[in-house]
Image (cartoon, rainbow, N blue to C red):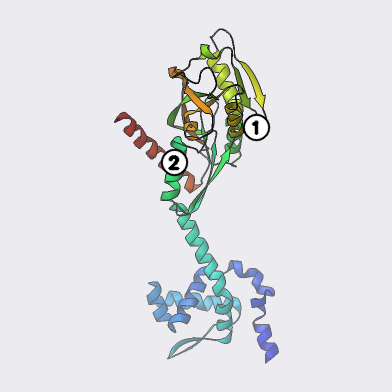
């Protein structure tokens, strides 16, 4: 008897038919579970809003494929056999995992959870990007925003390789194959020590910088700063000296505050409090730079689409507030 039962239940332990379990319809398992809970195919069918024949036939077909009976049938209804009891004992954790996975996927589609990988070239110290990250995480606490520092070229490569979902960039003239949405603008500032001769100026223009040393990081957004300096200096007489450093942007700004050279930063850096650092705006209209969201149209991450919609809506509200001032 023991050997017979062992043989009859061998498929539960991974022998023989367990390898074929993926072929069985999960629907039949749901029917088995409902019938076991209600002790009746009719009651199970009612609970599932189905016809009794549909439930009974699916369970019978399932039993035939397993090669063992799961229910004893009688005028009293149905009761689980030993094999049926063992089946539910073994299968319930798997069904719970499947339910969890389905709920997780549905929640991701509703932006209740998920992940958006975001590339930035500025700072989270302040400005639109900080407000966006803070507001989105408060509205969608189950969605993780994975923030990546870097430069424009690096972020574009990552977007095309599907390693980033979206990046917020300034120069977007070479983003073929990507979708672009301008969201906000920031003025460019000159960063210097409070002891610098220009520290008491209210604004500066490019000719003022001709005898200065502009220090640029080789990391993250450094190459973008270099491109900006070259582009904006075109047409002016003279050219500021340019030096490069291996430090990141924040460390570079601390170095600048100690009295070595100047550098350029976006307006969001105004909210980064660094001792002895002074930021003075560049006065020209061309020194207000647009920031755009850039992403791949082939990216099917549902959290990304809703993140972009959230950012656009926030940008529209921000522009309305600025116009109303």
Do the CB atoms of the residues marked 2 and 1 lie less than 8 Å apart? no
* Mark 2 neighbour class, 10 Å CA radius: few under 14, some 14 to 19, many 20 or more: some
* Extreme-top residue of the structure: 237
Locate residue 48, reporting x and y percent: 40, 72
Residue 27 seen from this side: yes
Q: Which of marks 2 and 1 is nearer the N terminus?
A: 2
In the rendered image, which quarter is residue 238 located in?
Answer: top right
Which residue: 52% across, 79% down? 60
302 up-or-down from 175: above or below: below
Locate residue 265, reporting x and y percent: 53, 27
Report the disc number at residue 290: none
Instruction: Residue under label 2, please give it.
Output: 132
Locate residue 233, reporting x and y percent: 55, 14
Instruction: Residue under label 1, please give it.
Output: 247
Mark nearest the camera among 2 and 1 is 1
Which residue: 53% across, 70% down? 95
């Amino acid at each position: 008897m023991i050997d017979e039962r062992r043989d009859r239940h061998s498929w539960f332990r991974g022998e023989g038919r367990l390898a074929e379990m993926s072929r069985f319809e999960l629907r039949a398992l749901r029917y088995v579970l409902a019938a076991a809970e209600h002790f009746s195919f009719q009651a199970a069918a009612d609970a599932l809003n189905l016809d009794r024949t549909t439930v009974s036939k699916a369970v019978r077909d399932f039993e035939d494929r397993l090669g063992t009976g799961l229910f004893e049938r009688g005028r009293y209804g149905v009761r689980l056999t030993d094999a049926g009891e063992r089946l539910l004992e073994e299968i319930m954790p798997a069904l719970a995992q499947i339910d969890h996975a389905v709920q997780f996927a549905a929640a991701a589609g509703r932006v209740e959870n998920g992940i958006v990988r975001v590339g930035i070239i500025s700072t989270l110290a302040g400005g639109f990007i900080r407000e966006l990250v803070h507001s989105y995480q408060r509205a969608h606490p189950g969605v993780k925003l994975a923030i990546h520092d870097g430069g424009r070229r690096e972020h574009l490569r990552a977007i095309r390789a599907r390693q980033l979902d979206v990046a917020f960039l300034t120069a977007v003239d070479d983003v073929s194959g990507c979708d672009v949405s301008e969201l906000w603008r920031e003025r460019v500032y000159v960063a210097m020590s409070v002891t610098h001769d220009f520290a008491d100026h209210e604004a500066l223009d490019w000719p003022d910088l001709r005898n200065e040393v502009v220090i640029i990081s080789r990391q993250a957004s450094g190459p973008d700063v270099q491109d900006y300096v070259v582009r904006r200096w075109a047409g002016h007489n003279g050219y500021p000296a340019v030096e490069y450093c291996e430090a990141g942007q924040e460390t570079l700004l601390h170095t600048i505050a100690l009295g070595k050279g100047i550098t350029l930063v976006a307006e969001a850096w105004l909210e980064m409090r660094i001792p002895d650092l002074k930021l003075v705006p560049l006065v020209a209209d061309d020194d207000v730079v647009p920031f755009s969201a850039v992403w791949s149209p082939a990216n099917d991450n549902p959290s990304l689409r809703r993140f972009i919609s959230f950012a656009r809506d926030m940008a529209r509200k921000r522009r309305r507030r600025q116009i109303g001032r």
